[in-house]
Amino acid sequence: MSAQRRRGLFIVLEGIDGSGKTTQARALLRRLRRRGLKAAFFREPTRGRWGREIKRLAARAGSLTPEEELALFVKDRRENVARNLRPALEAGTIVVLDRYYFSTIAYQGAKGIDPERIRRMNEAFAVRPDLVIVIHVDAADGLARIRGRKTRDELFERQDYLVRVAGLFRRFAGPHIVHIDGRGDKAAIGRAIWAEVEPLL
Ligand code: TYD
């Protein structure tokens, strides 16, 4: 079984701001660890130099063009793939990642950049996930959920923008992509996610 696996399982959670994906990613991690499995959690944007740069610049609305934004997310991701994701997977660890290049396709795509170009750019270097779980909530509900958060960031949280982002997230299709309704209660969503992950273990 796991001894024959050449690399760990790579699971990505995606969704708009306020979709609950971070909560679900952490719940999934706890479930995996309770099973005695070695699992690591990472997120994008990272807390590395490019991720911090993204945060700093995002705090000043309009300081970046969509292309500049795209370039920074890709730099951050290259570093994450090389420093964190690849080494963990090669060590046989299960990786749970909160946002990946599907976020770039949806968020920077919603700013007018060709989604296919974003995909090609990323797939040229990014490790392919074994499972991508996209959690869906309405933009208004997502915004309502994060309204109270201190780290709220004006640049990324406008509702009309998030409606377009959500529309792009809905378009993802493929054998490794699963769409989950994020409107129910947390535990039920957690069980729906686990039902997708467990058969892959
Ligand atoms: P988020 O996951 O909310 O991070 P945090 O919880 O640390 O604030 O991501 C921050 C914002 O960055 C979010 O609105 C989505 C956006 N984003 C992109 O626009 N493109 C990307 O490629 C990624 C990874 C995130």
Image (spheres, grey):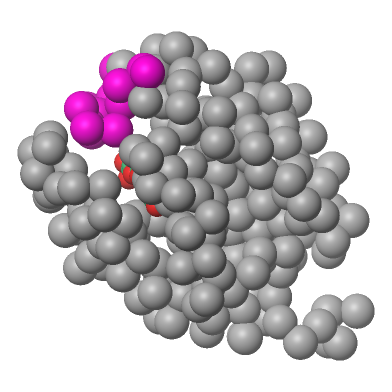
Q: Residue at x 62, y 85 (%)?
A: 91
Q: Residue at x 21, y 56 (%)?
A: 68
Q: Image height check: is 5 above or below 164?
A: below
Along the viewing direction, whichever of 114 and 37 lies nearer the viewer = 114
| Residue 129 appears in the picture as rendered | yes
Q: Quadrant of ligand 1?
A: top left
| Residue 23 appears in the picture as rendered | no
Q: Quadrant of the C terminus?
A: bottom right
Q: What is the x, y in percent for residue 21? A: 54, 38
- Magenta stretch: helix, strand or loop mostly: loop
- Whether residue 85 sits left or right of residue 83 in the image: it is right
Where residue 62 sits, quadrant-wise, is: top left
Q: Quadrant of the N terminus?
A: bottom right
Q: Residue at x 26, y 54 (%)?
A: 67
- Whether residue 19 sits left or right of residue 107 in the image: it is right
Where residue 129 sits, quadrant-wise, is: bottom right
Q: What is the x, y in percent for residue 33? A: 67, 59
Q: Image height check: is 180 above or below 27?
A: above
Instruction: Specify the segment rendered in magenta.
Output: 148-160
Q: Residue at x 53, y 66 (%)?
A: 120
Q: What is the x, y in percent for residue 127? A: 59, 74
Q: Image height check: is 58 above or below 29?
A: above
Residue 32 in magenta stretch: no
Q: What is the x, y in percent for residue 16? A: 48, 32
